[in-house]
Amino acid sequence: MILTDAIGQAHARAPDARIVSLVPSITELLCDLGLASQLVGRTGFCIHPADTVRAIAKVGGTKDVNLDKLRRLAPTHVVVNIDENEKPTVDEIARFVPHVVVTHPNAPRDNLDLVRLMGGIFGRDSEAERWCADFEAELARLRAQPKQPRHVLYCIWKDPWMSVSPETYIARMLAELGWTVPDLGAARYPSFAWTAALLNGIDEVLLSTEPYRFTEEHTRGLAAQLGKPVRLVDGEMFSWYGSRALQGLRYLQALR
């Protein structure tokens, strides 16, 4: 079994792999690296690129994988993520799949190791290096601009309201702008209450379009309720590593 994260480099080369991806952002990455024909399974949340993934079999969701369907696809490799997928499920998959690739990017630059890892395992090194060069250039452009310190509350869910901790990939994407999120406890994705102390410590509320589908209607209603600036942001641009992370860097520049 392959057990590594986005920072590790230990892997066995498998250019003829049969791949199931249980990570939406990595499904898109594998397609962009030219591996769509080897993707035999995906989750229902793997929606990009739409025309390509439509032909790839679904095996349930990121949290509720249909193991019987997965087993019938006879994959040689299953790609999972520590935040996206449940450990008991991954442990069960490892019982019948030869190689499980475990990923866990925590910061924008981790994308370089992630993409090289995928390119290295599945024989797409040159494609991976081209992507990494584009990413490095885009990140350098973003970092060349002055940061604009701002305290923001990034909301991912309501009922209960939930945010992100400073240790998450999302928070570290925000940090590229000089924006910080409050420390709301030990959880990586903490729940919170709208207290005066919390509101006094932030400049703006950001409502993400995923995983909860916040809309402009939510934005207007919450702004009126809180008396604080509230902005709707594209959650994929902040939380999807791999292919969409490159677009995410450009999105950050436009957002600033």
Image (spheres, rainbow, N blue to C red):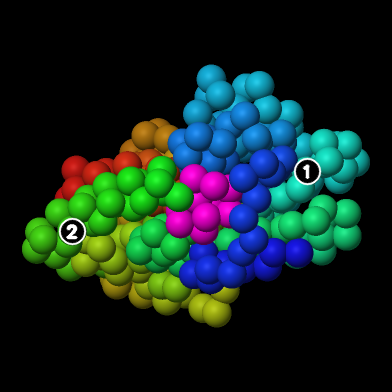
Q: How many marks?
A: 2
Judged by its main secondary structure, the magenta piece is: helix
Looking at the rendered structure, the secondary structure element under dot 1 is: loop
Image x and y of residue 194, in percent: 44, 63
**Residue 27 higher or lower than 83, as above or below:** above
Q: Is residue 184 above or below residue 17?
A: below
Q: Earlier in the sequence, mark 1 or mark 2?
A: 1
Q: Which amino acid is tagged 2?
A: Ala
Instruction: Give residue 46's quadrant in the image.
Output: top right
Give left or right: position of 97 versus 238.
right
Task: Kindly give the residue lying farthest to the bottom in the view shown.
Answer: 186
Q: Quadrant of residue 218?
A: top left
Label ID, residue 226: none
In the image: residue 228, left or right of residue 234? left
Q: Residue at x 39, y 59 (%)?
A: 112
Depth order, front residue of 132/171: 132
Identify the secondary structure beneath mark 2. helix
| Amino acid beneath label 1 | Pro
Q: Position of residue 54 (x, y in %)?
A: 62, 22
Q: Position of residue 208 (x, y in %)?
A: 42, 46
Q: Which residue is mark 2?
A: 140
Residues drawn in magenta: 115-124
Whole-number angstrom distance, CA of label 1 to CA of label 2: 38 Å
Give the residue drawn at x 11%, y 61%: 144
Residue 244 visible in the picture: yes
For residue 31, above or below residue 188 = above
Within 10 Å of the Cα at label 2, are there few (<14), some (14-19), or many (20+) other Cα atoms? few
Residue found 53% across the figure and 20% down from its top: 51
Task: Determine which residue is flagged by label 1.
Answer: 75
Residue 239 % position (x, y):
45, 52
Mark 1: few/some/many CA within 10 Å (<14, 14-19, 20+): many
Residue 174 within the segment the image draws in magenta:
no
